[in-house]
């Protein structure tokens, strides 16, 4: 899993704008994103994440939300436009885990977020 | 943090993937409610979640016994299942006997037991091949 620490002040709302993401669950998008990680393997998230990390993932399952709860993540972004089932979103709602989805691929999404956090903006096209 | 000992049991069903992780999120809520420090809660919850996934993925059924005292939090996970033939091998990072279905859920990459050990101050595992596995962990509360 690749992770990056946020040296700038980036919020979930900035991430939404940056990734052209749709908010599926989440009321407060002013939460500061402390760190970002991209992974499909939840065991890696449980091993390497730190509290307050935002997870970019292509895996859509209830286990992603439960991993976010257990590891104190600040939110989850599903990539490639994947829409989780309502039962997964209810779980996120109940646990107060913000959930977004972006049409971008994991690689593109990670690149854009990396650029925003480090100041090295990724070039479009 | 309350001074009395708190103890509760969670039941976990094998192959119940829809509910996998539910016990661990409950454990986390309980520990937070009891006023256990956040860093301890996170370590216990991560260890518990990995252990719960192991029960769901491999066993028929299992029980998680959570105890909380002012000095530490312990988890004892006992399952009825195939057991582990070679514990030394199972403790190696990356070693796994997981199926494709398990891997598709983001688990089964051979990181579970090493990750549980990493989050524990005390770790003990015993297994009877063909019968079941007992896992015990202790996480000390900060002084």
Image (cartoon, rainbow, N blue to C red):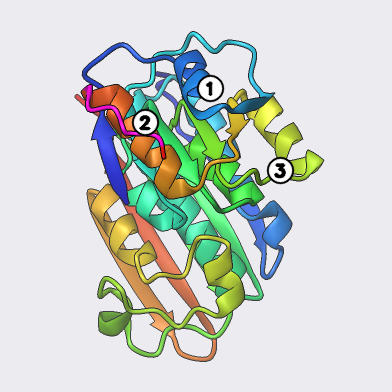
**Tag 1's secondary structure?**
helix
Tell me which segment is drawn in magenta.
Answer: A119-124
Q: Say which residue label 2 marks.
A: A113
Residue under the image location 44 percent in, 58 percent down: A41
Q: Position of residue A83 (x, y in %)?
A: 71, 43
Question: Which quadrant: the C terminus of chain B?
Answer: top left
* Nearer mark to the viewer, of 2 and 3: 2
Q: Is residue B99 shown above or below A80?
A: below
Q: Is residue A17 above or below residue A106?
A: above
Q: Could you tell which of marks 3 and 1 lies nearer the N-terminus?
A: 1
Magenta segment includes A89: no
Element under disc 3: loop
Which residue is the extreme one toward the right? A86
Point 33% across, 34% down: residue: A123
Horizontal relation, residue A105 to residue A107: left or right: right
Give how far apart the Cα atoms at labels 2 and 3 are. 20 Å
Mark 3 residue crowding within 10 angstroms, few (<14) / some (14–19) / many (20+):
some
Q: Which residue is the extreme one toward the front?
A: A125
Q: How many marks?
A: 3
**Quadrant where the N terminus of chain B is found in the figure:** top left
Question: Residue B24's quadrant in the figure?
Answer: top right
Q: Does B31 sit above or below residue B128?
A: above
Can residue B43 be seen from the camera position used here?
yes
For mark 3, what is the residue? A83
Name the mark on residue A16.
Answer: 1
Q: CA distance from mark 3 to mark 1?
A: 15 Å
Q: Chain of mark 2?
A: A
Q: Main secondary structure of the magenta part?
A: loop
Q: Report in which chain the residue with disc 3 lies.
A: A
């Amino acid at each position: 899993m690749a992770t990056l620490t946020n040296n700038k002040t980036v919020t979930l709302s900035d991430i939404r704008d940056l990734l052209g993401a749709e908010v599926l669950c989440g009321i407060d998008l002013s939460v500061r994103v402390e760190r970002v990680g991209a992974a499909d393997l939840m065991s890696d998230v449980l091993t390497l994440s730190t509290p307050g990390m935002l997870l970019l993932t292509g895996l859509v399952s209830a286990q992603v939300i439960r991993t976010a709860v257990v590891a104190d993540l600040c939110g989850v972004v599903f990539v490639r436009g994947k829409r989780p089932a309502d039962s997964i979103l209810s779980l996120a709602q109940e646990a107060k885990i913000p959930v977004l989805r972006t049409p971008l691929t994991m690689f593109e999404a990670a690149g854009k977020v990396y650029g925003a956090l480090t100041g090295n903006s990724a070039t479009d096209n | 943090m309350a001074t009395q000992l708190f103890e509760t049991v969670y039941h976990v069903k094998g192959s119940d993937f829809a509910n996998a992780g539910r016990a661990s999120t409950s454990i986390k809520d309980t520990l937070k409610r009891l006023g256990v420090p956040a860093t301890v809660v996170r370590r216990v919850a991560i260890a518990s979640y990995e252990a719960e996934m192991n029960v769901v993925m491999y066993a028929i059924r299992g029980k998680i016994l959570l105890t909380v005292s002012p000095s530490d939090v312990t988890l004892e996970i006992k399952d009825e299942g195939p057991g582990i033939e070679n514990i030394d091998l199972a403790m190696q990072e990356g070693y796994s006997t997981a199926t494709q279905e398990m891997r598709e859920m983001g688990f089964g990459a051979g990181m579970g037991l090493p990750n549980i050990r990493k989050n524990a101050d005390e770790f003990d595992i015993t297994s009877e091949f063909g019968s079941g596995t007992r896992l015990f962990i202790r996480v000390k509360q900060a002084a």
